[in-house]
Image (spheres, rainbow, N blue to C red):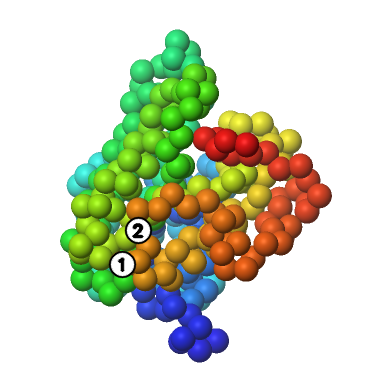
Amino acid sequence: MSAGERPLAGRTLFISGASRGIGLAIALRAARDGANVALIAKTAEPHPKLEGTVYTAAEQIEGAGGRALPVVGDIRDEEQVAAAVAQTVERFGGVDICVNNASAINLSGTEALEVKRYDLMQEINTRGTFVVSRACIPHLKASENPHVLTLSPPLNLDPAWFRDHAAYTVSKYGMSMLTLGMAEEFRERGIAFNALWPRTMVATAAVRNLLGGEEAMARSRRPEVVADAAYTVFTRPSRECTGNFFLAEDVLAEEGVTDLGRYSYGGSDAELAPDLFLDD
């Protein structure tokens, strides 16, 4: 594959929560181009319910053809994030793409949700997105095609999406509102801020452990559906592609990919479950 066919070759991604799932899939897709990937995540040791660590993810990234910098850190800690970004710049010379992937989920109603769980979601989802984006922005300004991509949904104010899990909805919409605001704030600087969300559930540890086990996994698409869409967004000119709430399948359709059977976790004939926050 020539350099022209590998648009992310030599470019540097900083990804939160990329030990597994969608974050790792995005990292591996970029690594196939020869990209540099810095990943910050909390999982340093194997966990019985969570596949992979920040170190095993780095091994996979390098095995796929990229260069990896694993950083054990908590995106709720501003100093840890700043240090991780500084390490990234020292190792790879800058940051071209920032991916806000780390997220916490709890679909409990108001009375059932402990305040500490509420705080956790706000701190990881909304605050973490702000902290990571803010730390990367000074370096993104020096990139030729800078992108910030946040894994959060389009803003749908139908009360149905607030009724059963208001706290989680607020935390995810906070990520989306930061995307909307920063897209306008940094439009003139040429930094693209976009959000990306799948039409269906994606087979991740959260789905297996919290949202229905293997039955839910069978009705999900594989993380690569989001990774391939993210890759497409990264390769678009940042000055022409900002402030969007993309759906992964729509991005792929724009590129001529309409047969999504290969992304099905449970088989191409499985009945897929729609993701949250999307109208029928």
The residue under label 2 is: 242
User: 236 or 225: nearer the eye?
Assistant: 236
Answer with left or right where residue 113 lies relative to residue 179: right
Residue that appears at 29% across and 53% down? 183
Residue 146, quarter of the rendered image: bottom left
Q: Which residue is mark 1?
A: 239
Q: CA distance from mark 2 to mark 1?
A: 7 Å
Image vertical order of residue 207 relative to residue 142, above or below: above
- Packing grade of label 2 (10 A; few <14, some 14-19, many >=20) is many
Of the pair 219 and 25, the residue shown nearer to us = 219
- Give the crowd class for mark 1: few <14, some 14-19, many >=20 residues within 10 Å: some
Residue 78 image-quadrant placement: top left
Residue 149 visible (yes or no): yes
In terms of secondary structure, where does tag 1 sit? Answer: helix
Secondary structure under the numbered disc 2 in the rendered image: loop
What mark, if any, has residue 70 been given in the picture? none
The correct choice, above or below, for 157 with respect to 130 in the image is: above
Residue at horizontal 37 percent and vertical 78 percent from the top: 10
Left/right of residue 235 with respect to residue 228 in the rendered view: left
Q: Are marks 2 and 1 in contact (CB under 8 Å)?
A: yes
